[in-house]
């Protein structure tokens, strides 16, 4: 058997063992586990946790320690529940250079930071499939901006932030030609590029803009984290497939004993930009933002500034790292750079200060396309021996310990940053991917819990057909040993997650949109201004909703094939009183209007008849009465446009003579 297939067999058998019940759960030791996760009715959780939805493209918000699901915030995927990506105001959020892309694979939420600590302003999350970075506003739990990342395919090593959100970074998991073009896949080594992206974040508004990109050799750039404290100014990206295979990576990218961490000196990049060392590369990409009027618009980027290590020496270094590394995590002091070498039998820990010294002393082992490869011994601070199998990701408790997820052996390993010795291991059920400590990748972790985000659930919950619930597990980390407190299922597949103390944001929540400040051009701020207007075969229904009726709620004169725009303004000025709007046979979704907000749904009736519409959100005792009718007549019919709101009299008085269709 070749070395590789031996490894594969060993891994496979371990995977089975890891998923078994061999290790007795430690929950038995915590007699008070229930008490520790019990949040009494009416009481609040201590933390908000933001978990990626993985291939559901959204963000799940949970309370900790209870594990209660608080919200499912739409980001990259259309959400019929509230019309996200369906309503006229939000459709543009999902615009890309590939057209309208109503789905993505969202992996890594990342909280904005001030001085290296989560500040509760924004949450960034990457779209992996059609490369994008989204920014959510945490006073509204709404996606406010989505920026497409050009020259990238699989924006996986993203969107990790620097200490003050100077940048959010991206890196392409799949190298492709940049700019993309028609070449033979056989030309991978010469024609393909691994492009990293640095996105500027405006500190006042959060608005994102691509500052520059870096063209690196065609490896797979997997994960990233920015430096902090002394290593602020640097960003670290793992890469696998330094073999540069272009098929059957399972084997072809597992040849080398070490791949690399790319260490990027972004202050050096800034200097090179100033010295005009970048070249302009044409690139068309969409930049979508919800305006102050609540309406999303797309702008188009037409190029990027591209830096190369050859033109900007000192920009990039490679740190050899065993073996096909996945996660890269920087400890709270900024000194240690921990890799998760998923096929390695140890956890390599690089030292930032040793790296600086190695660079100064030119302790180079080789060079790859103008990028110095530092000597492994020159940067390594230590190796964690026998941590378990398949290290992926590491978080920190701020008390000198690191916690690494071990995918193959299904466990969390706690080790000391002092001597790199393992101090505790606890099983997870099963196949843990990421793990998360509140603030655990920041300068000041909030600590208290670690959450395991598992890939396989198996026997942990009631079975639900071929697909089982994805699973998170909450462990207490206040003592020497980790203690399992709670299993809870999640929506979508959580990859990474972030959490912060609830008090950071709970009192900053927007309760309603001020109606008088509503800038939507079709907003009706009172029932008096509601109306129906025809322009050719486009009909604008400018309507209002308030407990418990729509105005108007009786409309005639619509014809088959019209494009009917329902602009519905919610007149309420109370917290937690959304109204819904749905119409029979609509081919898109419903609308959900928050208090003071206008949302627009387009409906193209396909047949004649009477079409009811109604409020979908149970808003009052008379919610069931909150309904209306639309009459649809044949194409070309001369049934006059009529509606039952105050404005109709004025229009009718001007000549229609038919009178309002009654009250
Ligand atoms: S990656 S485990 Cu995006 Cu680790 Cu999911
Ligand atoms: Cu409004 Cu139900």
Image (spheres, grey):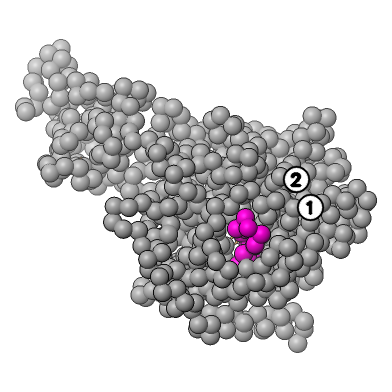
Q: Is residue 324 above or below residue 202?
A: below
Mark 2 residue crowding within 10 angstroms, few (<14) / some (14–19) / many (20+) = few
Query: What x and y, as percent, mark residue 374?
Result: 86, 56
Q: Is residue 662 above or below residue 136?
A: above
Q: Which residue is pictured at 40% across the width and 39% down the height? A: 507
Task: Please give the range of residues in magenta.
Answer: 392-405
Query: What x and y, as percent, mark residue 273?
Result: 78, 32
Q: Are marks 2 and 1 in contact (CB under 8 Å)?
A: yes
Q: Is residue 53 above or below residue 584?
A: below
Q: Is residue 403 magenta?
A: yes
Horizontal side of 602 relative to 20 (left or right) equals left
Q: Which residue is mark 2?
A: 230
Mark 1 residue crowding within 10 angstroms, few (<14) / some (14–19) / many (20+) = many
The image quarter in which residue 16 lies: bottom right
Q: Which residue is pictured at 12% across the width and 17% down the height? A: 649
The image quarter in which residue 140 lies: top left
From this viewpoint, which residue is outermost toward the top?
A: 654
Query: What x and y, as percent, mark residue 383?
Result: 76, 68
Observer-nearest of 62 and 82: 62
**Residue 662 in sight in this render:** yes
The alpha-carbon separation of the residues under discs 2 and 1 comes to 8 Å
Q: Which residue is pictured at 46% across the width and 33% down the height? A: 290
Q: Is residue 338 magenta?
A: no
Q: On residue 387, which mark appears?
A: none
**Residue 604 in sight in this render:** no
């Amino acid at each position: 058997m070749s070395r590789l297939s031996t490894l594969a067999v060993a891994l496979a058998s371990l995977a089975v063992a890891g998923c078994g019940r061999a290790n007795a759960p430690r929950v038995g030791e915590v007699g008070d586990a229930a008490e520790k996760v019990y949040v009494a009715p009416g009481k609040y959780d201590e933390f908000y946790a933001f978990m990626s939805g993985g291939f559901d493209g959204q963000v799940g918000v949970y309370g900790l320690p209870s594990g209660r699901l608080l919200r499912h915030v739409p980001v990259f995927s259309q959400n019929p529940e509230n019309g996200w990506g369906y309503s006229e105001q939000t459709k543009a959020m999902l615009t890309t250079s590939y057209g309208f892309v109503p789905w993505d694979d969202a992996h890594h939420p990342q909280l904005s930071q001030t001085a290296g600590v989560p500040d509760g302003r924004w949450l960034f999350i990457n779209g992996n499939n059609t490369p994008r970075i989204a920014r959510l506003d945490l006073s509204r739990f709404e996606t406010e901006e989505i920026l497409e990342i050009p020259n990238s395919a699989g924006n996986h090593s993203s969107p990790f932030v620097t200490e003050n959100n100077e940048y959010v970074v991206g890196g392409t998991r799949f190298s492709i030609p940049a700019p993309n073009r028609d070449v033979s896949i056989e030309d991978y080594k010469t024609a393909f590029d691994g492009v990293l992206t640095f996105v500027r974040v405006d500190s006042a508004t959060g608005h994102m803009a691509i500052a520059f990109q870096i063209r690196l050799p065609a490896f797979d750039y997997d994960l990233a984290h920015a430096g902090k404290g002394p290593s602020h100014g640097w960003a670290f990206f793992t890469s696998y497939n330094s073999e540069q295979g272009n098929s059957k990576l399972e084997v072809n990218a597992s040849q080398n004993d070490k791949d690399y961490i790319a260490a990027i000196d972004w202050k050096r990049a800034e200097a090179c930009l100033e010295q005009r060392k970048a070249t302009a590369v044409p690139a068309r990409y969409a930049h979508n933002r919800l305006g102050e009027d609540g309406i999303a618009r797309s702008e188009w980027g037409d190029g990027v500034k591209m830096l190369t290590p050859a033109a900007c020496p000192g920009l990039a270094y490679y740190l050899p790292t065993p073996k096909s590394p996945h996660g890269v995590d920087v400890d709270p002091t900024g000194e240690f750079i921990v890799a998760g070498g998923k096929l390695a039998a140890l956890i390599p820990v690089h030292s930032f200060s040793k790296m600086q010294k190695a660079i100064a002393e030119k302790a180079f082992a080789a060079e790859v396309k103008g990028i110095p490869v530092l000597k492994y011994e020159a940067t390594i601070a230590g190796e964690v021996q026998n941590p378990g199998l398949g290290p992926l990701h590491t978080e920190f408790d701020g008390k000198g310990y690191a916690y690494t997820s071990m995918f193959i052996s299904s466990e969390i390993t706690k080790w000391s940053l002092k001597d790199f010795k393992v101090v505790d291991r606890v099983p997870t059920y099963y196949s843990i991917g990421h793990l998360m400590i509140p603030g655990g990748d920041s300068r000041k972790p909030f600590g208290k819990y670690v959450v395991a985000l598992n890939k396989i659930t198996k026997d942990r919950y009631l079975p639900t057909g071929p697909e089982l619930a994805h699973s998170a597990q909450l462990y207490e980390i206040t003592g020497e040993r980790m203690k399992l407190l709670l299993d809870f299922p999640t929506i979508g597949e959580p990859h990474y997650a972030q959490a912060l103390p609830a008090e950071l944001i709970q009192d900053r929540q927007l309760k309603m949109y001020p109606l008088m400040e509503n800038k939507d051009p079709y907003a009706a701020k009172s029932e008096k201004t509601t109306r129906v207007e025809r322009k050719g075969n486009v009909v604008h229904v400018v309507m209002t909703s308030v407990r418990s009726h729509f105005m108007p709620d009786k409309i005639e004169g619509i014809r088959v094939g019209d494009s009917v725009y329902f602009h519905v303004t919610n007149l309420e000025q109370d917290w937690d009183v959304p109204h819904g709007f749905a119409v029979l046979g609509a081919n898109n979704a419903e609308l959900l209007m928050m208090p003071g907000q206008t949302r627009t749904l387009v409906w193209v009736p396909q047949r004649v008849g009477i079409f009811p519409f109604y409020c979908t959100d149970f808003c009052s005792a008379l919610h069931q009465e909150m309904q209306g009718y639309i009459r649809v007549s044949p194409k070309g019919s001369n049934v006059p446009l009529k509606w039952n709101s105050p404005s109709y009299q004025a229009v009718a008085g001007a000549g229609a003579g038919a009178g309002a269709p009654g009250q």
